[in-house]
Amino acid sequence: MQIYLDYSATTPPRAEVISLMQRVMSQQWGNPSSIHEWGQRAAMILERSRIQVAHLINAPPESMIFTSGGTEADNLAIMGVARQYTQPQHLIISAVEHSAIAEPVRMLEQWGWQVTRLPVDSRGRLHPLDLQAAIQPNTVLVSIIYGQSEVGTLQPIEILGQIARAHGVLFHTDAVQVAGRLPLDMQQLPVDLLSLSSHKLYGPQGVGALYVRDTVRLTPLLAGGGQEFQLRSGTQAVPTLAGFGLACQLAAQEMASETPRLIGLRDRLFDLLADVPYLLPTGDRLNRLPHHVSFSVVPPKPIDPATLTGKTLVRQLNLAGIGISAGSACSSGKLSPSPVLLAMGYDEKTALGGIRFTLGRDTTEADIDWTAMVLKQVLERLIPNQLLALSV
């Protein structure tokens, strides 16, 4: 029995997407910048995809800048704003950003930029008043992740965006985990820049987009032929963009039924594991991604937490044919506590034990029930065995 529960890492491309990409690669492979018939056929595919992606978030097609993925979209948002200034300015992020935001911001900090990292509470949620207090006269950008990929918490993006707008500060959000699962309306959200990724919503890997409001000016990261409205040079990957567009169209069509189904499965797994010893739920249960379940394993005191971590459970469940992910990072073979859990106030022992189950189109109730049973058995086997070894 094979059960994949790591949809926040990547989703399997839909059969319809694969079929379309194969057709485009074999029949519409022209360079969309060429003015002859072959190029124009490719250009039509490209612009259809732009319309489909824009429709998912209710945005004008010309506001969508295609990129190689969510990481490039995040970098273009951060660096595209920052590179307009000859002198370092001030920007604001949260303490629980994805590395695609945290790393370019760290680079700017090394170059003299002032950075404020807003704290979050034990659920991973930040308080709007903290943003209000952090804005300075030289603040040029606020970037707050919409749905946190490790603990599932949703931030109050609408309120945060309103605060930034009231101060005349640009607002960016990484909505990679949210798009296709919750409605996004760029005609209503006070957001200037928003990042998307194809492979998080059943499209191909290696393609994404940055929404750029028409009043926003960015400096491009790449110099070249001036594709993507002069903001992202390089010949567009037409087949993968075609797949991205179709994936967005299908997500928009199915969201009204699929999101409630995922919420039901998510809550079922939380409930099935609610009374399991040594499992601590993480994140915000109410303000949460619809497909996301997360815990931290906290072994009893005699056990060294480094011997029973989130990665331990990932390996054990993998042996049982279940794919999940761990919240802790491994660098040079050494386990490190999760920065996200540390930012939420957990101690290092707890921050080593993060695990994440993320659900998708193919997830069933039977999958949820089986996974809960297997995880219980794994914990019952690992923890008593270690306690026995310590007592001998």
Image (cartoon, rainbow, N blue to C red):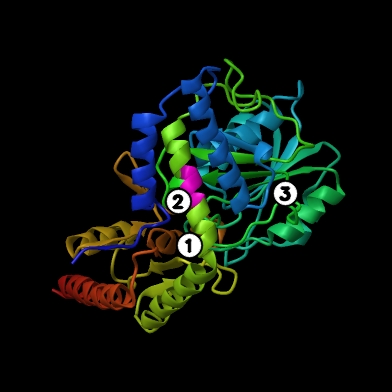
| Spatial separation of the CA atoms under disc 2 and disc 1 | 30 Å
Foreground pick, 284 / 342: 284
Residue located beneath label 1 in the image: 347
Is 370 situated left or right of 298 in this image?
left
Q: Amino acid at mark 2?
A: Lys
What residue is drawn where x is 81% and y is 54%? 163
Residue located beneath label 2 in the image: 200
Foreground pick, 342 / 301: 342
The answer to whether residue 278 is visible is yes
Residue 13 on image: x %, y %: 36, 49
Residue 326 on image: x %, y %: 36, 57
Q: Which label number is shown at residue 191?
A: 3
In the image, residue 135 above or below residue 299: above
Name which of mark 2 and mark 1 comes first in the sequence: 2
| Spatial separation of the CA atoms under disc 3 and disc 1 | 34 Å
Region rendered in magenta: 244-248
Residue 96 on image: x %, y %: 57, 53
In the image, residue 249 above or below residue 392: above
Is 344 situated left or right of 14 in this image?
right
Which is the main secondary structure of the residues drawn in magenta?
helix
Foreground pick, 201 / 320: 201
Q: Amino acid at mark 1?
A: Asp
Whether residue 44 appears in magenta in the rendering, the answer is no
Name which of mark 3 and mark 1 comes first in the sequence: 3
Q: Amino acid at mark 3?
A: Val
